[in-house]
Image (cartoon, helix red, strand yellow):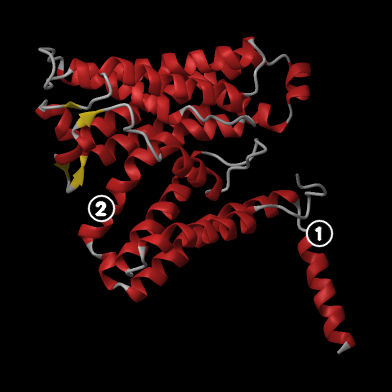
Amino acid sequence: MPGLLAGSARNAHARRSLPPAVRARLRALVPLGVLVLLCLTISAVAPSFLSVGNLVRVLIAAAIPMTLACGMTFVILMGSIDLSVEGVVAVSATVLSLLVANGVNANDYGLAAVPLAVLAGALAGLVNGVIHVRLRIPSLIASLGVGFAGIGLATLILGGSAVAVTDPLVLGMAFHRAFGIPIIVWIAAAAVAVAWFVQEYTRIGRWTYALGGGEDICKLSGIPIERVRVGIFTLAGAFYGLAGALSVAQFGEGQALIGEGFLFSVITAVVVGGTSLAGGVGGILNSVVGVLVVTVLGNGMVLMGVPPELQEGVQGVLILIAVGLSLDRLRARIVK
């Protein structure tokens, strides 16, 4: 028995003595392992999960959260938080629905209106960033206020009603397919590719990690911290704007509450994917895995017949497990 205890102690010590880079790689693989385990468990209980039709449904359900996660990941990477998601989505969806063929006016700008919806989202993100940086208001409060203002503005413009969109090209983003996959999924994949490129090959991407790692060091290094923060919130707003356009295509209408429920799901997905709320750790590909974990979990519970009233509880427990496994608690002396 003493020998067994000594062996266990040596193994624990060996795990603690792993180099930080190795521990980081192992933590990065945990969400992927959770995703694989989920897929295997669900397919064992509900074989229809692995059918082509159901996998396409999973991709469709993940498309909008994936686009939102591209923006949210950058904000969380630099150690901030963005609660304006639903408001920015509402504003961009309102812009698009009123500029394409619809049931309330004669506008018919077709797909040319999509960049304008993205621009509206970017402008909302710019306002968010400027308020946060110039007025020195914490990102939590600044973004929450911008989010409520966005929903209020959309409600005011639309008069509290929904605008039915009839433009076939806009609706086609959700219903038309290329190689068997809906266009909306390809657009989300393109958004992920752009976000990954920005993260890996641009200065603002590198500076985002630097800000999350320590703002004091960034000041000594000459990084323009305020401009980077405003730029990240603007970039995030552009992704939210694109998600708003995709929401109009998917739901066939624009309304002030079209983004309702997205905030919780996107923050959950980013954190479950392994991006630290403290900043500096994680990335776009982590968020892709996180979105798939959350989407597969929701899809699987429906297929396995889990009662709706239990689904949120199950989701919450598995999220705690996934986040707990991905944290480096060996280095966290204080948790607050």
Residue that numbered label 2 is attached to = 57
Question: Where residue 119 sits: x, y (%)?
Answer: 36, 15
- Taking the image as shown, residue 237 lies to the left or right of residue 324, namely left
Classify residue 187 by image quadrant.
top left
Query: Which residue type does callout 2 highlight?
Result: Arg
Residue at the outermost top position = 134
Residue that numbered label 1 is attached to = 17
Question: Where residue 112 sits: x, y (%)?
Answer: 20, 16
Disc 2 is placed on an element classified as helix
Q: Is residue 202 visible?
A: no
Question: Where residue 97 sits: x, y (%)?
Answer: 22, 22
Relative to residue 169, is residue 188 depicted above or below? below
Q: What is the spatial separation of the Cα atoms under label 2 and label 1, in whole angstroms?
A: 44 Å
Residue at the outermost bottom position = 1
Q: Callout 2 environment at 10 Å: few (<14), some (14 to 19), or many (20+)?
A: some
Label disc, if present, on residue 98 of the rendered structure: none
Q: Is residue 14 visible?
A: yes
Q: Say which of 105 and 159 sits in front.
A: 159
Residue drawn 56% across the image and 26% down it: 205
Image quarter where the C terminus lies is top right
